[in-house]
Image (cartoon, rainbow, N blue to C red):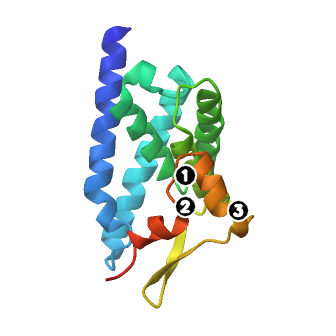
Amino acid sequence: MAHDVAALAAELTDMAAADHRSAVCANSDDPAEQLAWRRLTARHGDRLGEIMDEYGWPTAELVGEEAARAAWLIAQHADRQLDVQRRALRLMRQAVSAGSAHPRELAFLCDRTLVNEGRKQIYGTQIAGVKDGAPVPWPCEEPDRVDELRAEVGIEPFDEYVARFSMA
């Protein structure tokens, strides 16, 4: 079992590294690069589904902090696999309740899943686009409470967050 878990941790971190290398292709002007990104994230989403079948949510206790974060990233980018995102969200919620996963990461996955479902996000983590050089979030359920809700899960205030995305 220990060998299996070590191999799983290595596999998750390798998948996240491939994700990071390919992320620039997500919004590429080249359709072939966009397709390569979609195929990569779909393969990773499929594999995460298999991992969740076998292990449940891959927590830091199981696979280590880096691999647990990698699992979250893979779920976050499984945008065309709502079944995988919803399942990851459900399992991650349980892990957060048990103190085995980070509320901050759960908030990002929650918003991402809601946006992918065509619903309003809660924490304002998902950016719809840029208008006049300023990031514009997808609509939020309670825009007046976004910073309060973000603080509850350890996310910086919205203005600080989007400042990182702003065009200089």
Image location (x, y in percent) of residue 23: 33, 60
Q: Which residue is mark 3?
A: 145
Q: Earlier in the sequence, mark 2 or mark 1?
A: 1
Does residue 162 appear left or right of residue 12 in this picture? Answer: right
Image-based side of 131 in relation to 83, left or right: left
How many labels, in total? 3
Give the position of the C terminus as an image quadrant. Answer: bottom left
Sooner in the amino-acid sequence: mark 3 or mark 1: 1
Residue 80 lies, in percent from the top left, at 55, 57
Residue placed most toward the observer, 161 or 1:
161
Q: Residue 13: give x, y in percent of width and height.
A: 30, 36
* CA gap, disc 3 and disc 1: 16 Å
Give the residue pinned by disc 2: 125
Tag 1 secondary structure? helix
Q: Residue 56: x, y in percent?
A: 56, 24
Looking at marks 3 and 2 on the same chain, the residue that comes earlier in the sequence is marked by 2
Q: Image point 44% across, 38% down: which residue?
A: 71
Instruction: Name the residue at 48% across, 41% down.
Output: 46
Identify the mark at residue 108; answer none if there is no mark.
1
Mark 2 and mark 1 residues within 8 Å of each other at the beta carbon: yes
**Disc 2 secondary structure class:** loop
Determine if residue 116 is in view: no
Q: Amino acid at mark 3?
A: Arg
- Mark-to-mark CA distance, 3 and 2: 13 Å
Mark 1 and mark 3 in contact (Cβ < 8 Å)? no
Q: How packed is label 2: few (under 14 Cα within 10 Å), some, or many (20 or more)?
A: many
Quadrant where the N terminus sits is top left
Q: Residue at x 34, y 34 (%)?
A: 66
Mark 3 or 1: the one toward you: 3
